[in-house]
Amino acid sequence: METDYVIIGGGVVGLSVAWGLLKRGLRVTVIDGDDGSFRASRGNFGLVWVQSKGMSQPRYARWSQTSAAAWGAFAAELGAATGQDLGLEQKGGYDLHFSEESLQGTVEKYEALKRKLDGNYPFEVLGHNALRKEEPQIGASVVGAILHHQDGHANPLKLLRALATDVRRLGGRVLTGKTVTDVTRPDGFRVTCADGTRVEAGKLVLSAGLGAAQLGPMLGFKAPVRAQRGQLLITEKLPKIINRPSLIARQVDEGGIQIGATNEEVGLDDGVTQPGISRLAAEAIAAYPVLAKAQLVRSWGALRVLSPDGLPIYQQSLTLPGAYLVTCHSGITLAAAHARLLPDWLEGTAAAPDLEVFSEARFS
């Protein structure tokens, strides 16, 4: 074989896995699409987020916690190797609420999940006055917030660039502008692209995001992924306004306020709509009135990758052993786990995490 692993998909998920495999001394080739591909890695909100995840599946909460805890060392290692500061901050994050009923209902759900996690779910409830001490610019209509201490955020574009740079530095090949048309298995896996490029590998990882819906069945996967559009906004660079990120807005490392995001079931349409961005702007101003004076400099839409239950899918093919499906909604949060722990699962080592709950069997 010319390479130990071929990874189809060069976004944050695929590159995180590639980086981890290369760190173990394995040979890796990444096949990535062209600029017309739908790219969640270039349009996401950048949160390293634990709260609200795993409400119906505690194993997902634990997996998110594991990755969030590994993010600091992961970012430091990537930064040292590439000279790129990933803008990581993990000082907690807010779930902001505009009604007491909404706040209390969410707290009850968090308490239930905390019990399932043996108490390892560190959050506190802040009323409006307590929140205002933490966030002086918070709006009067925000009645309170849940501050979860395992949350944070990073710069997703810097993460993507650092991963691509370090994968190449470690000896990995990254082939861009490719469209995979066929996968055969004469001896190992032979991946053929539309331009005639062929890659032969001992194992294969499908991490092509929405592309898995088309490629998955030829490898024996159900790959029941769908698109969900998220529209986002970003303002001009501003003095420090927001101390911690929320699901409504965060101040990025470069100074702008990123506002998001919508959750729209519109198929493969990643466009921007006036109703969508107007709704985002209104909610952001309600949360932080000072933003009414901010200038918007950019808006965009991106497509999330979602399974039917919103959880990741980690599955080895039942018909083509050695082929693996790796797909998730939270590619930024889980980047550290994908880089540090998922290679052990792919290699079947004793240290491999138990990911059975995330297999496709749950969709049968």
Image (cartoon, rainbow, N blue to C red):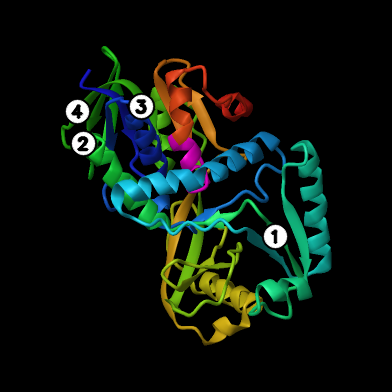
Relative to 84, residue 183 above or below: above
User: Callout 4, which amino acid?
Assistant: Arg
The residues colored magenta run 327-339
Q: Which residue is mark 3?
A: 24
Disc on the earlier residue, 1 or 3: 3
Q: Secondary structure at mark 2?
A: loop
Spatial CA distance of label 3 from label 2 is: 31 Å
Q: Which residue is mark 1?
A: 147
Q: Which residue is mark 2?
A: 194
Residue 220, how many percent across, how many down? 44, 22
User: Callout 1, which amino acid?
Assistant: Leu
Disc on the earlier residue, 3 or 2: 3
Given this view, does label 2 or label 1 mark the residue nearer the observer? 1
Q: Secondary structure at mark 3?
A: loop
Indicate yes or no whether the magenta region holds residue 68: no
Disc on the earlier residue, 1 or 4: 1
Disc 3 residue crowd, few under 14, some 14–19, many 20+, Cα 10 Å: few
Residue at the bottom extreme of this rendering: 293
For image coordinates 55% across by 63% down, the residue present is: 261
